[in-house]
Image (cartoon, rainbow, N blue to C red):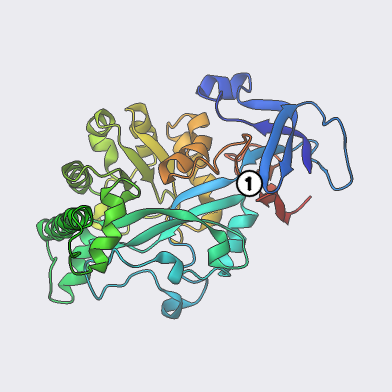
Amino acid sequence: MYFYNAKIYQQQSCLQQSDFQTNGAGFIPCGYVQVENGKIAAVSGGTPVKISEGDIDLHGMRLYPGFIDAHTHMGLIGDGQGAEGEDVNEDSDPVTPHLRTIDGLCHNDGYFSDAVKAGVTCVVTGVGSSNPIGGDLIAVKTAGRCADEMLVRRVGIKFALGENPKSTFSDKDSAPVTRMATAAVIREALLKAKRYMTDKQSAEENDEALPEFDMKSEALIPLLKGELKAHFHCHRADDILTAVRIAEEFSLDYVLIHCTEGHTAADILGEKKASAVVGPIICDRGKPELAGQTTANAGILFKNGVTVAICTDHPETPIQYLCASAAYCVKAGLPAAEGIRSITRTAAEIAGISDVAGDIAVGLDADFAVTDGDPLEIMTNVKMTVIGGKIVYSDM
């Protein structure tokens, strides 16, 4: 199948805001994408040599990589279901790295339909921030017959700092009730997992009895090996820097989630080449940690060398406002090209899925958002969404 006659957005060459705004660098003005077996088989300018029945003429449209939200709770907080539909926080224990998001994911939740209609083809979703260490985080496509079919891969383990763990466990009259205790709980679990991993490796190498099975430590081994990233929920500047401190102490590949006051420490984070998923953007300052919130945050972080993606933190901001969230960041100083990258290529890179999503390139999954204009403009509409080469939404 060909999707042709569209203005195709390729991001490798779209690096400067001036290029993006003045000469359209990054766009194939009138091109086509060939799809075979759910993958992109060819991308080129002009018209395909052969137009067959079933090929799609996108005259006057723009074709972008499917939009990606790098931090949500999609499928774990139900659409209009109230408390009954919430499976996002297992707050019976402060340390639960062995929880698997896929076991709580409601694949047919109504919000997935909203995502598809907004051109969002992939999200990172997982547990909330009640626990110092929650469960895993997974990248999933936004359409499919079941969670297993939608799954791209596991991408991280969730950690949380600041007020959420404090308030959760102070109500239970158990640790942690301070920031110090939260960090200590995390360190204890990581140190235990590190020793468990070492003992296990030694036993296997020397043909000795394995240490007693520890499911929580087992869950943290991929993190310690660098196979999964540590996603740290952190708003306040001190919590952000605590996340960096712990990550460096254990040599973790980490992502700063929310990073609300990151702009106050942007120079430090830039020196450390940190990655941040900034958001929610369209929300109020509903708790003390958000006092320093500003839409200029993403732009300041980026200009200081931090790798930045934009998220909705769905349902804090509904998933259909991902592009609008990026637009507000661009309005406040994030370069326009980076606004698009923050919800496509950069989001994929931070999530660890850039080998399958985030751009229009041969070999990647055929996930597209077709729009009738600039997605950073409020009046632009998504006219078609394609996931794995299949049209899952069309208003053409």
Outermost residue on the front side: it is: 207
Q: Residues within 10 Å of mark 1 (few under 14, many from 20)?
A: many
Q: Which residue in the structure is indicated by mark 1? A: 367
Q: 230 left or right of 7?
A: left
Res. 56 image quadrant: top right
* Residue at the spot 54% in from the left edge and 40% down from the top edge: 358
Residue 176 percent coordinates (x, y): 14, 65
Q: 87 left or right of 79?
A: left
Residue 255 percent coordinates (x, y): 32, 45
Tell me: residue 368, above or below residue 360: below
Front position in the image: 325 or 389: 389
Front position in the image: 365 or 287: 365
In the rendered image, the quadrant that contains the N terminus is top right
Front position in the image: 145 or 396: 145
Tell me: residue 214, above or below residue 393: below
Query: Element at badge 1?
Result: loop
Q: 58 left or right of 287?
A: right
Residue 295: in sight, yes or no? yes
* Residue at the spot 35% in from the left edge and 48% down from the top edge: 227
Q: Mark 1 belongs to which amino acid?
A: Asp
Res. 272 image quadrant: top left
Residue 98 percent coordinates (x, y): 31, 66
Q: How many tags in the picture?
A: 1
* Residue at the spot 37% in from the left edge and 55% down from the top edge: 284
Residue 131: in sight, yes or no? no
Tell me: residue 197, above or below residue 65: below
